[in-house]
Amino acid sequence: QSSKQSQGIQTLLEAEKEAAKTVQQARQYRVQKLKDARADAEKEIEEYRKAKDAEYKTFESRHADDTSDTQSAVDKETDAKLAQIAESYKNNKDAVVKKLLDRVVLVKPELHRNLKKAS
Amino acid sequence: MASRPLNDDEVVSEMNKMVAFIKQEALEKAREIRIKADEEFAIEKAKLVKQESTAIDAQFEKKKKGAEIALKIKQSTQTNKSRLRLLQAREQYLQDLFSTARDQISVLSKDEGRYLQLLEGVIVQGLLQLLEPSATVYSRPKDLELAKKAAANASKQYKEISGKDVEVSVEATLQDDSAGGVKLRSGTGRITIDNTLDERLRLLEDRMLPEIRHDIFGINENRKFYA
C-alpha cells in the first residue's frame, strides 16, 4: 500500500520537475531574445550609418565641383575688369595729366570773402 | 467525489489527469513567457534603432550645414580677393598718373612770359592769404630776378584787390631742382605759405581724386549719393 503511495508521489514530483524545466527554458528564451534585440539593432544602425555616410559623400563631391566653378568664373570676370581698367587708363591718362598741369598754373587770387576792400 | 476508496484503475486515471494538468499549466506559462519575450524584443530593438538613427541624422545635418557655411565663406573670400585685385590695379595706375604729372611740371617754368605771370599770381594769392603789412618771398636762385619783378607787380595787384599796402622782400632760398613757384612768410615770421608748383600739384592730386576717378575709370555704379 505505502509503496504504491510513494510511487504516486514520485510521479507527481517528476511531473513538477519537468514543468519547471519547461518554464525555465522559456525564461532563457526571453533572456536570449533581449540580447538579440541589441545585436540586431546594432546591425541595423550600422547599415543606416553607412547609407548616410554615402549620402554625405555624394553631397560633398557635388559641392567641391561648385567651388572650383565659381572660382574660375570669378577669375574670368576679374580679368575682364582688369583689362577694362587698363584700356580706360590708357585712353584717358594724357587728358587727365593735362588737366592737372593746367590747374597747377591756374591762379585766381581772391580777397577773403569776409573782408571788404579797404578804401 | 467517490465516498468509497478508489480502486487501482481509478487511482491510475486520477494520477494521469494530475500529471497532464501540471504539464498543461507549464506549457501555457512557457507560451506566455515566450510571446511576451517576442514583444519586448521588437519594442527594444525599435527603440534602440530609433534612438541611434535620430542621433545619426542630427550629426548628418550638422555636417551638411557646416559644409554649406564653409562654402559661403569660400565664395565670399573669392569675391573679396577679386575686389582687392581691382583696387590694387587702380591704385597703381593712379600712382603712375601722379608720377607722370610730377615729371612734367618742371617744364612749366620754361616759358618766361607765362612763368612771370604765374609767379605774380602765386605771390598775390599768398599775400591775400597772409593779409600782413610785410612779407618775404622765397624763390629758386635761378628765379630771383624774375621773382623780384613779379613781387613788385604783385604788391600793386594786392593793393588793387584789398586796398592794403604791403612791403615785400625776396630771397632765393628754395632748391634749384624744385619745379618752381614760391614760398611766402609773414613779416613777423609766424605764418608760412607754400605756393610752389610741387605743393600745388600735391594739393591738386588730393582734391581732384573724385574727378580723376570719374575721368579715368568711369562713374562709380555703386554710388548713390553725390553732394
Image: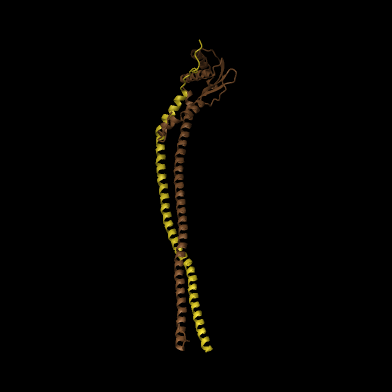
Name the residue furthest front.
Answer: B3
Number of residue marks:
0
Estimate the x, y position of residue B3 in percent, counting from the top left. Answer: 47, 84
Q: Which residue is drawn at 43% across and 60% down?
A: A51
Estimate the x, y position of residue B2 in percent, counting from the top left. Answer: 45, 84
- Colour displayed for chain B in the image of the structure: brown
Chain identity for the colour yellow used in the image:
A
Estimate the x, y position of residue A80 in percent, counting from the top left. Answer: 39, 41
Name the residue furthest top.
Answer: A119
| Towards the viewer: A118 or A43 | A43
Q: Which residue is drawn at 46% across and 81% down?
A: B18
| Towards the viewer: B193 or B39 | B39
Q: In which quarter of the image is residue A52?
A: bottom left
| Towards the viewer: B170 or B79 | B79
Estimate the x, y position of residue A54 in percent, counting from the top left. Answer: 43, 59
Image colouring? by chain
| Towards the viewer: B48 or A2 | A2
Query: Is residue B180 depicted above or below B90 in this figure?
Result: above
Query: Is residue B150 depicted above or below B76 in this figure?
Result: above
Query: Is residue B50 depicted above or below B146 in this figure?
Result: below
